[in-house]
């Protein structure tokens, strides 16, 4: 079984069937590029992976664990969905940085919130231990658990700080750590968004046309960061219109048209020797766009 | 001079009542407005429509009429006793302003892009975390200008309390005109202007404080 398995995803909005049975798999450390014309369902597919939409049919598993199975017919609780989501990260076309926080805080926020929740849990556990202890013991235990908590908190804080600095360096924005999003170029904002998505160490990082909202001269810096992630063995799913990028970075390419996979294979197979007429037409069209 | 001081103090007493209505209205209407805003955005349809109709009625009728209904209504309809006058005025103001505030809140909340919520969601945040850590400050920044407008209007609307003989500043000044003294009536403008001036400075300060980011 592959690391990421998507089987028979179907999704409709009213009468509009957007995904008509999408199945694919991906090995750990591989990069999958998804190409296809507008309205084909690429964004919807990524949103299904990230539990922003619920497929009507299909199953999803990561590392052998079934995360979603439409046949189960039971609604997950919010907490369960949050848990499952953490397997995935998503970089949006429009960045969606939090405008009121600095670059550093944007990246650190989710980690801080998770750590806080973990600490609160720990605190409750320790309190439960105190409660069953006898009176003499209790005082000593209380003092002790206070120390433990302080230690844990400091250790977590340090770890978050170190990780955030490392991510800043990785996207080349260490000197912008205290800037606010509006002070950054689009390319820089998108690099922050990538670092933010990496912060919780998702198993699979998804990108939805990460460079489409950027001026052409800014796409390079973002693509370079994504290329850099490939060499560090991240598993990625990248929806993109940049054919050159897809060819050079992807291990495998999916061409999606009207909610079905028209073509799939290695970049060479899809770009140099496409089987389907639709794929050929699409590739011809995107070449024309480049030279237009 | 003696007369001027005496009348100034008398007006100040009325201004105290004005401030009392103003403060109590803010204190209760600001949170109540938020509750109404969430009601009007509820996914539970009946609640949503009840709130929307309520807001429509309150915003669609004069505040003066609402004050009269709150004061005389219980007695005329059910034969209950009268509320204390100031209390009746405050109740009417709270209901009225909560409705206006709720529309401002709603506009502010709905103006936040879906992407902000989704960014929070994919980072594993809870609904509460998304609201308090991501959305709230952006909403506040958006609503400060319309809120300051509404709150400045409130300062002047307090003069409507006169309709059920609450001794606010304008009522007191008006009573002087009956004795033939006209100037106190115009003199009240000074009190209002000072109050609104202070509020304007406060809101300007708040806007500036929130200027460090852009939404
Ligand atoms: N929430 C929604 N409600 C209704 N229809 C939707 C919704 N989201 C997407 N759609 C429809 O689903 C179809 C596929 O949309 P999707 O955004 O997945 O396409 P895409 O391949 O990402 O296109 P693009 O290249 O333009 O980004 C479109 O026809 C769109 O109108
Ligand atoms: Mg899309």
Image: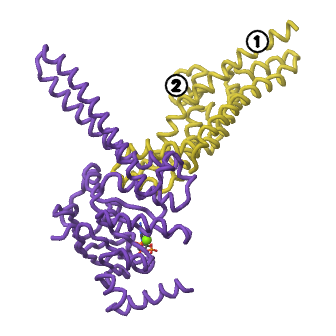
The residue to which callout 1 is attached is: B9
Quarter residue A280 falls in: bottom left
A59 or A185, which is in the foreground?
A185
Q: CA distance from mark 1 to mark 2?
A: 39 Å
The residue to which callout 2 is attached is: B79
Q: Which mark is residue B106?
A: none
Q: Colour of chain B?
A: yellow
> The C terminus of chain A is located in which quarter?
bottom right
| Residue at 79% over, 20% down | B173
Q: Within 10 Å of the Cα at label 1, are there few (<14), some (14-19), or many (20+) other Cα atoms?
A: few
Mark 1 or 2: in front is 1
Q: Is residue B71 above or below residue B140?
A: above
Q: Position of residue A238 (x, y in %)?
A: 37, 70
Q: Is residue B53 above or below residue A6?
A: above
Which chain letter goes with mark 2?
A: B
Q: Position of residue A258 (x, y in %)?
A: 37, 81
| Residue at 40% over, 56% down | A170
Cβ atoms at labels 1 and 2 below 8 Å apart: no
From the viewer's perspective, tell me whether residue B182 is left or right of residue A120.
right
Mark 1 or mark 2: which comes first in sequence?
A: 1
| Residue at 39% over, 72% down | A239
Q: Colour of chain A?
A: purple
Q: Please tell me in which quarter of the rendered image ligand 1 is found.
A: bottom left
> The N terminus of chain A is located in which quarter?
bottom left
A62 or A201, which is in the foreground?
A201
């Amino acid at each position: 079984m592959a690391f990421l398995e998507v089987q028979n995803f179907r999704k409709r909005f009213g009468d509009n069937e957007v995904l008509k049975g999408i199945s694919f798999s991906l090995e750990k450390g591989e990069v999958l590029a998804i190409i296809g014309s507008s309205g084909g369902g690429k964004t919807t597919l990524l949103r299904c992976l990230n539990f922003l939409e619920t497929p009507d049919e299909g199953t999803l598993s990561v590392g052998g664990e079934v995360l979603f199975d439409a046949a189960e017919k039971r609604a997950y609780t919010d907490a369960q969905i949050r848990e499952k989501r953490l397997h995935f990260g998503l970089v949006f076309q429009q960045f969606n940085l939090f405008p009121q926080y600095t670059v550093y805080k944007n990246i650190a926020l989710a980690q801080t919130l998770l750590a806080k929740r973990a600490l609160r849990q720990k605190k409750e556990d320790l309190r439960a231990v105190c409660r069953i202890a006898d009176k003499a013991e209790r005082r000593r235990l209380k003092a002790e658990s206070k120390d433990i908590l302080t230690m844990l908190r400091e250790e977590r804080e340090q770890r978050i700080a170190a990780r955030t600095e490392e991510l800043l360096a990785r996207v080349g924005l260490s000197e912008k750590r205290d800037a606010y999003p509006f002070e950054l170029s689009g390319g820089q904002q998108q690099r922050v968004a990538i670092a933010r998505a990496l912060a919780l160490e998702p198993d699979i990082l998804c990108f939805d046309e990460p460079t489409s909202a950027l001026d052409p001269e800014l796409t390079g810096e973002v693509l370079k960061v994504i290329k850099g992630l490939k060499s560090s063995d991240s598993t990625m799913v990248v929806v993109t219109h940049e054919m050159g990028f897809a060819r050079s970075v992807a291990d495998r390419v999916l061409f999606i048209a009207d909610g079905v996979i028209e073509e799939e294979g290695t970049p060479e197979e899809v770009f140099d020797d496409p089987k389907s007429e639709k794929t050929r037409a699409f590739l011809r069209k995107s070449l024309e766009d480049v030279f237009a | 001079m003696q007369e001027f001081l005496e009348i100034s103090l008398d007006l100040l007493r009325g201004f105290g009542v004005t401030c009392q209505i103003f403060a109590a209205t803010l204190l209760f209407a600001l949170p109540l407005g938020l509750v109404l805003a969430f009601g009007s955005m509820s996914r539970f349809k009946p609640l949503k429509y009840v709130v929307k109709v309520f807001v429509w009625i309150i915003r669609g009728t004069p505040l003066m009429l609402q004050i009269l209904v709150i004061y005389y209504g219980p007695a005329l309809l059910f034969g209950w006793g009268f509320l204390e006058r100031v209390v009746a005025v405050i109740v009417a103001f709270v209901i009225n302003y909560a409705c206006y505030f709720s529309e401002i809140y709603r506009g502010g909340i709905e103006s936040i892009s879906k992407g902000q919520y989704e960014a929070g969601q994919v980072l594993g945040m809870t609904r509460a975390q998304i609201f308090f850590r991501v959305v709230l400050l952006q909403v506040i920044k958006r609503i400060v200008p319309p809120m300051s407008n509404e709150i400045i209007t409130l300062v002047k609307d307090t003069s409507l309390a006169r309709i059920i003989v609450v001794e606010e500043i304008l009522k007191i000044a008006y009573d002087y005109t009956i004795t033939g003294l006209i100037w106190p009536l115009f003199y009240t403008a000074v009190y209002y202007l000072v109050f609104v001036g202070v509020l304007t400075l406060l809101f300007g300060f708040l806007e500036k404080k929130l200027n460090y980011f852009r939404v």
